Image (tube, helix red, strand yellow):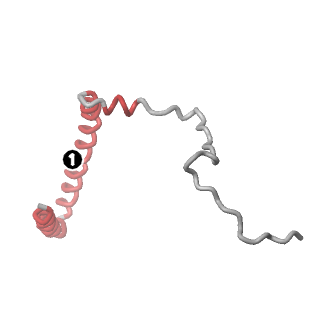
């Protein structure tokens, strides 16, 4: 499937290179069409996204809104808790200065 899309894009690129290289008006027209299509996609996505989130029946949007309060401080963990690794002392004593 990816190969077909890549082949289509290469064909489109070759066609546009021929059209754009030979005519400056075609370049301006092509840029206008691509820009208008990009704006249409962005506006449509912006308008449709709230409806898609509201139509979610799994409740994922509600769980996303129920995030932890960033203002609360997290408690520090206990270093002497069971299951924690306890570092060992060095084998020899270190001479004092």
Q: Can residue 65 be seen in this view?
A: yes
Q: Is residue 19 visible?
A: no
Location of residue 7 in the rendering, given as x and y in whole percent from the top left corner? 12, 67
Read off the residue under disc 1: 37
Callout 1 crowding tier (Cα within 10 Å): few <14, some 14–19, many ≥20: few
Question: Horizontal placement of 75 versus 54: left or right?
Answer: right
Q: Is 94 on the left or on the right of 87, as rendered?
A: right
| Left or right of residue 62, residue 29 in this image | left
Q: Is residue 96 above or below residue 33?
A: below
Residue 9 picture quarter: bottom left
Q: Residue 18 location, x and y as percent?
A: 14, 69
Q: Is the residue 41 above or below the residue 19 in the image?
A: above
Query: Which quadrant of the view contains residue 78?
Result: top right
Front residue of this view, candidates 9 and 15:
9
Residue at coordinates 87% horizontally, 69% vertically from top-left? Answer: 96
Q: Which of 68 and 76 is in front in this view?
A: 76
**Quarter assignment of residue 5:** bottom left
Which residue is at 21% across, 47% downward? 37
Identify the image quadrant of the N terminus. bottom left
């Amino acid at each position: 499937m990816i190969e077909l899309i890549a082949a289509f894009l290469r064909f489109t690129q070759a066609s546009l290179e021929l059209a754009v290289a030979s005519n400056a008006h075609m370049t301006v027209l092509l840029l206008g069409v691509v820009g208008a299509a990009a704006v249409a996609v962005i506006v449509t996505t912006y308008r449709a996204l709230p409806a898609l989130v509201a139509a979610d029946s799994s409740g994922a949007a509600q769980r996303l809104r129920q995030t932890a309060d960033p203002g609360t401080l997290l408690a520090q963990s206990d270093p002497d808790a069971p299951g924690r690794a306890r570092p060992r002392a060095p084998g020899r004593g270190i001479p004092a200065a």
